[in-house]
Amino acid sequence: MKRELVLASGSPRREALLRGLGLQFDVLRPQVDEVYDAQWPPGKIVRELARMKARWGAARRPRALVIGADTLVVLDRRILGKPSSPDEAVHMLMELQGRAHTVYSGVAVIDAVTGREETGFRATEVRMRPFSQDRAKAYVKTGEPMDKAGAYAIQGVGALLIDSISGDFWTVVGLPLGLLDGLLQTFDVGLFPDF
């Protein structure tokens, strides 16, 4: 029997990634308070926030297999969220330029029928090129950074700011596909069911 699959995420990037793989699924935009214990390590934070989103979706789709995800950018042990203004986006970018930071993405899969949950996370180091404040302002004017953790999108124009990455590219985009496929396989579902 084919399972109903739901993505509990407000991210158009995550949706596009899964659609690009040819998956059939519904999207629910979770309404959750992303509250966590500030003492938790980043990997636990992204796993727990992903779990909260997936639980929210499972409560609304009681027959589905629900995917939740969350991403954080960490610089010097400090979390950089989504910028609240263009000025804050420029400030974040100037903090990141010429330096390395770590992107954490967590994934949760919940079987709403049984309540079984599987979670995991990946971390990838990203090094940005040095750039000027004028370049940061020009990038912010594109609008791309405004709904992104750390104020950039590696899969968009923000790629021009990146020097190198060490780890999984899809983690930086916001959905580590290898991790997700492994979690889905534990439910006898995969991103490539015939592979």
Image (cartoon, grey):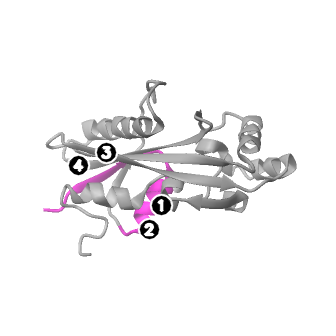
In the depicted structure, whether residue 7 falls above or below residue 79: below
Quarter residue 186 falls in: bottom left
Q: Earlier in the sequence, mark 4 or mark 3?
A: 4
Which residue lies under the disc numbered 3? 119
Q: Earlier in the sequence, mark 3 or mark 2?
A: 2
User: How far across and down, in percent of the image, does residue 128 sit?
Assistant: 70, 54
Q: Is residue 19 magenta?
A: yes
Which residue lies under the disc numbered 2? 20
User: How far across and down, in percent of the image, does residue 31 sit?
Assistant: 42, 33
Q: CA distance from mark 1 to mark 2?
A: 6 Å
Quarter residue 61 falls in: top left
User: How far across and down, in percent of the image, does residue 153 sit?
Assistant: 62, 54
Residue 159 in view: yes
Mark 4 neighbour density, 10 Å: few (under 14) some (14–19) many (20 or more): many
Q: Earlier in the sequence, mark 2 or mark 4?
A: 2
Which residue lies under the disc numbered 1? 16
Task: Nearest to the eye among marks 1 and 3: give it.
Answer: 3
Mark 2 neighbour density, 10 Å: few (under 14) some (14–19) many (20 or more): few
Q: CA distance from mark 1 to mark 3?
A: 21 Å
Q: Which residues are magenta?
A: 1-22
